[in-house]
Every structure is written in C-alpha cells, then in structure tokens.
Image (tube, helix red, strand yellow):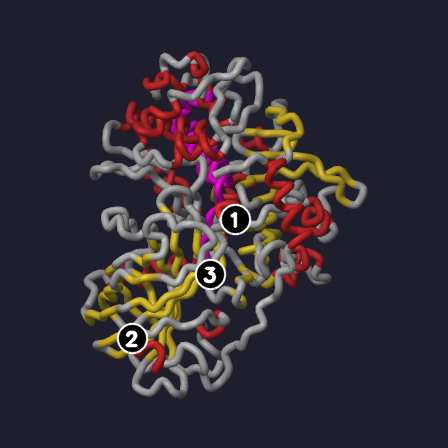
Amino acid sequence: MQLSYPFMLLLFLFWGCNSKPKAWDGPTLTQARTQITVTELTGGKNLSLVDLSFFTKPPWASAAKHSLQGTISIQESELDYPKEKEYYPGEDIFPALQLDFLTHRGAIIPRNRNRISTKDQRSSYWDVIVGTGETWQEAGDGEWSRASLPLTLTDRWIGTARNCVASFVFKPDSISNICLQCSQETADIDDKGLANINGMLSADLQDKQLEDTAQIIQAYQQAEAARLPLRPLSEFDRKGKIASYFDRMIVTNAPTSLGAIFWNDTLFLHPPKTRHGDYPYPDEMRHGLYSVTKSMAGALSLLFLEERYEDDLFDLPITDYVPALADHPGWKGVTFSHTLNMVTGVDGGEDPERLLNTLIVAETAEEAISNIAQLPDVPALPGQQFNYASTNLFVLSYALQQYVITKEGEGVNYWDLVREEVLTPIGAGQFMVLPTIERDSTEGIPILAYGALPTIDEAAKIALLFANEGSFLGKQLLAREQVRDIFGKTNWGGHSTGNDFRGSGYQHGFWSKVINANGCPVKATYMLGFGENYVIFLPSGAIIFRFLDEHDLDVSALIVAVEGIVSSCD
C-alpha cells in the first residue's frame, strides 16, 4: 500500500540517522562443504541462516551423478519467519506443491514457469514461482547428486517478492528434504515486511517420464537464447561510482535488490545483493515493483489496445464500460486517458487505510469496483487536476476488459492479448502481474495499480519497447503518438503534479523531472513504485534500473553518475 511521500521521507531521515546496518560477514562455501551437507538435508532439522554461496554450484564441483525427471511433491511446511508484528494468516507456512522437473546439461528445469496459485489451499499466504537452477556433485556427497533452484514467494494481495533459493540432494528414486532460504525481497518496509525466512521442507520424488520433455527443453533453450546481452556493471562503470550508489546501506546491509544500466544494446548488471551474500540466480530473480506496474503494465496495455483497434480509445468515456460508476458524479466525462493520467476528478483514496479497504481486501473485480463507486469526488473536473490514486488504474483495467469483450466477445481476457501480441514477441512472455482473485473459474484481470513481478530481462525488454517508441523489429506494437507523448516528443506537455515529491510531470503513467547533471539540465522520464523502485529513461538512451524497498526517492546522484559516463548533452 502507498504512504504519503512526505511521511516516507521523514521515515527515511529517521532510519538514516538511527540505524547502523552491518555487512554480512559469515562463512562462505569452501571445500569441503560445512553447511547444507547431505547429513543435514537428509536429517530434516531446520538449519540456521547461511551465506547463499552454500546454495550455489562451486568451481570444484563435478557433473551430477544422476539425472532427474518426474514430480517433486512438497508437503505443507512451517517456515521460520521472525517478524516484529502479527503474522497475516498463513504467512509462516510454505504451501503444499507438486512440481514437475527435468534435468538437461546441468540445468534443472521446472515444467511450470508461471505463477503457481495456492489460493484453493487457503492455509498458506504464498503463491510460488520456480525458476531454472543447477545440478552438480561435490566430494562428500557420496551416492547423492545435488541441486539448487531459485524460488519466489509472492502474496495474492499486493505482489511482494521474496527472493529465495532452495537446495536438496537426490538419487534416481529418492530426494532429501529441501532447504529453503529467503534473504532478500521487495516488500513493504513500513509494514515490517523485511525479514529473513528459512525452513526445511519435506519432499518426495516420483520418478517418471514427462510426456512433453522435448517441448520443455526447447522452451528453456529459446528463453535462454532470447535474453538480452548481459555484462558486469564494472565494464560500464569503471570508476565504481554507480556501484557505490547501489551498494549504499540504508536500513539493512542490502537495500538494493538489483541495480543495472541498459546501454548500447547491453544490460550491465551489478551483482544482486542479499543480507547473506550475492543472489546466485540474478537472471531468475523476480522483483515486486508496486506502482511501476502502472507504467510497465497499465500504460503498456492501453497503448497496445489503442494501436490494435485504432478506435481513439484514449478519448472514450470510462462509464460506457464500467456501468457501476455511471451514476457517480465524479466519473461523468472521465475518459480512458484521464484515468491513466490521474486526472479523473475523483478522490481515489490513496491513503493506506482507504486503499486497503477499497482495493486491496477486495478479492473479485466486482467487489473492487463496488468499493470504488463509494469514493467521493473532488471539486476539479476531469482533466483539470492531478490526483494520484491507485484505484484509477483498477478502473482502467476493468474498463479495458469490458472494451475488449465488445471487440472480441465473451471469454477473451485483454491481458492474454497483451501477452500474446506484445510480451511474447519481445521475449517477455513470462512477465507476471497480480490478478484479481475470482471465486469461480473466471480468469482474473490485472490490478494494474501494483503487482508486477518482472525479472530484470523482462523489465529491460518492456522498457526498451517504450524507448523504441512502441516498435519492435519493424512492427508497431504500441500507439506511437502516445509513446512520444511520454517522452516529451510532441506538443503535449503532460500534467503538472505541482512538484510532487515523486516528480514534476506525469505523462500516461510515467513521471518526469529535470535533473542538473554536471551543469547540464537533463529531463529524466521514469517509472516509479513504492520502495522506491525506479526505471529511468535518459535522453542519451541509457536506461537505469534500481529496485529497492527501503525508501530513497532522490536518485539525482545516480543519474549524475550515469550522465558522467554517457552524457545526454554531448
């Protein structure tokens, strides 16, 4: 949920003056292994937190003695999750899961790379996303082979991301317990959501041939081949000024989940830090970006449908597609464009309590719209005054769904169209957003206000699509004129935010402000989400990614450091 930014700034100043975070200085993996041993994994006793190097394949490892193909069944298990406040129901429970895997040339590949919903279990707070990991064997493992996997825990209400790693040993017909550790997240620090989580999960292995083995391997190989070129940040940031910004300690010893620069067709990545060493699978790491979703998914969806149907969708009345708002005075005359641009003339209830009671606790789309219909309006007419509200983006999502039904018929979900015609072609087909929780088999629609869970590769590909004015390989996927609006390339100047703490201009879900970079005025256009998560576009063509959960609104020094390497003013 969102807090007022002046209040968040006060919190940040308090933390900055009163906290003294310490870097992790525990033991790291050496030969021979001293942590997460075969004896510990087969014993089942919960282990203490360790450096994440113990979850990685070491240089001295040999190839796994065994292959694996079949179903791993994980039993519902209690998690060690020390927390300063009361648990949400099921927050300390790992859900029961059945996961199909196969190994291929040292990789262990999940059959299902999508978000795995556990809403029907109701005992656990978490949905799960499993990524591709590694298999190997070390001296001392005996007849066992070893594996580790990246794994993300995410909730069904906000879209936080707990970056975890799981490790186990296996034989052809048996598996040990699974050691799980989560030492980094993009979560709500104001809700005391930052915490280390670990547990020993009881598991069984059913060795069996998967019918679609060839397809699983092919999809994995295609995804790997389609990744953007990746290089160490140090090759771009030779003096370490950008790295020092990403490495700053605020509240914990690793506030920045990920920092990267896209430049000259290459993604330069800083090693993603956790509170227990570097995260071993940066390509698979998912990030809960909160209001970045408004740009990365909301603007993307509207601009795609505008291009697809050529129907002046931006100017259509919202109430034609959201009948529950038709009698609300504040929504009269509001268009799709007004809704994306936060100039609806409606008081959206952005304060934490109203946002919680209006949108977050509403599970179904109809419940959320019914709650929004109870919100008051403001004196300003549509289009007159910027008034930031997450509820606007859910109204937009609901309207987009009803609009697509008028074009395509019942049963067509607009997000499926976005995935098929935009995300999959650009190589970001696994990009995930938070959907509504419908009580029947109805497919949910994206919240759009928050809940995006991209990898850095997916985030960069979506950002690059915007930077290229909505065009990919010569095909226009997004409405070009509106994309040009975002970056100030048209006569439209966007909406003034009244020098909000977050920025001075707002254009189709994107913020902007001018930064003085080494004596040169540089207009930065950016996606911004609670935490503060940034995707920043500079006129030079450089794109900055900074994913954080400890409140640092001022990225001027970061922009200046990047401008010192590739200037927008040369």
| Mark 2 lies on residue | 176
Query: Looking at the picture, how far across and down is residue 89, in whole percent?
Result: 33, 49
Mark 2: which secondary structure?
Answer: loop
Q: Which residue is mark 1?
A: 189
Badge 3 is on which residue?
A: 196
- The answer to whether residue 130 is magenta is no
**In terms of depth relative to the viewer, which is nearer, 1 or 245?**
1
Q: Residue 274 at x, y = what percent? A: 53, 62
* Residue at position x 21%, y 77% in the image: 173
Instruction: Give the CA distance from mark 2 to mark 1.
Output: 34 Å
> Dominant secondary structure of the magenta stretch?
helix
Q: Is residue 372 at all visible to an observer of this figure?
A: yes
Q: Is residue 385 left or right of residue 356?
A: right
Q: Which span of residues is magenta-colored? A: 285-314
> Tag 2: Cα neighbours inside 10 Å, few (<14), some, or many (≥20)?
many
Task: Name the amino acid, label 1.
Answer: Ile
Q: Name the secondary structure under disc 1.
A: helix
Q: Is there CB contact under 8 Å for labels 2 and 3?
A: no
Q: Could you tell which of marks 2 and 3 lies nearer the N-terminus?
A: 2
